Image (spheres, rainbow, N blue to C red):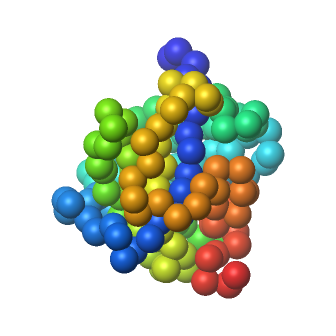
Amino acid sequence: METMLEIERKYLIDLDKWEPKNKGLKIKQGYLSVDRERVVRIRTKGDKAYLTIKGNQQGITRTELEYEVPVSDAETMLRMCLNFPIEKTRYLEKIGGLLWEIDVFEGENSGLYLAEVELEDENQTIELPDWIIKEVSYDHRYFNSWLSQNPFSKW
């Protein structure tokens, strides 16, 4: 598999200005490793499952490798994960030629709403939707691996 770079910005959203435009997709994910140098995540996403390895973040860029795995294997790995799984519904919206992923968190992270957009490079200019409140790309508290250990409900 070819090494991929993930360049991503994260934002808090204003619920008074945003509402889902589609049904969304249920996601459940857990972490097998949350080491600073490498994060290993297992995720079920609808009727598919993925094992993802992410390298250390430099700015808003990091190496990401992702592999599809059988759902039954993913369910076994989810039971092996550290702490508790992240549960959320993801909504996709195309804005300004870019695909935005809006995550509505559930369970221990209920009340958290994040939007993410992947970029071609860190300095890419993007058109922010009017429902964006604040960028949190550099705030580790909004990384899913952190939220699996330090839930939003306990902040």
Q: Is residue 99 left or right of residue 56?
A: left
Q: Is residue 106 left or right of residue 81?
A: left
Tally of marks? 0
Q: In the figure, 84 relative to 139: above or below?
A: below
Residue 122, position in %: x, y?
62, 30
Whether residue 65 is visible here, answered yes or no, is: no
State the residue lying farthest toward the right.
36
In which quadrant of the rendered image does the C terminus lie?
A: bottom right
Residue 27, position in %: x, y?
39, 59
Q: Nearer the viewer, residue 147 or 69?
A: 147
State the residue lying farthest toward the top.
2
Q: Which residue shows up at 63% across the image and 44% down it?
A: 40
Q: Which residue shows up at 49% across the image and 80% down it?
A: 111
Q: Nearer the viewer, residue 74 or 63?
A: 63
Residue 141, position in %: x, y?
70, 63
Q: In the figure, 154 relative to 89: above or below?
A: below
Q: Is residue 82 left or right of residue 5?
A: right
Q: Which residue shows up at 33% across the image and 67% down it?
A: 18
Q: Nearer the viewer, residue 79 or 41?
A: 41
Q: Is residue 127 left or right of residue 150?
A: left
Q: In the figure, 58 relative to 146: above or below?
A: above
Whether residue 20 is visible here, answered yes or no, is: yes
Residue 14, position in %: x, y?
44, 71
Q: Which residue shows up at 56% across the image and 45% down it?
A: 9
State the residue lying farthest toward the bottom.
154
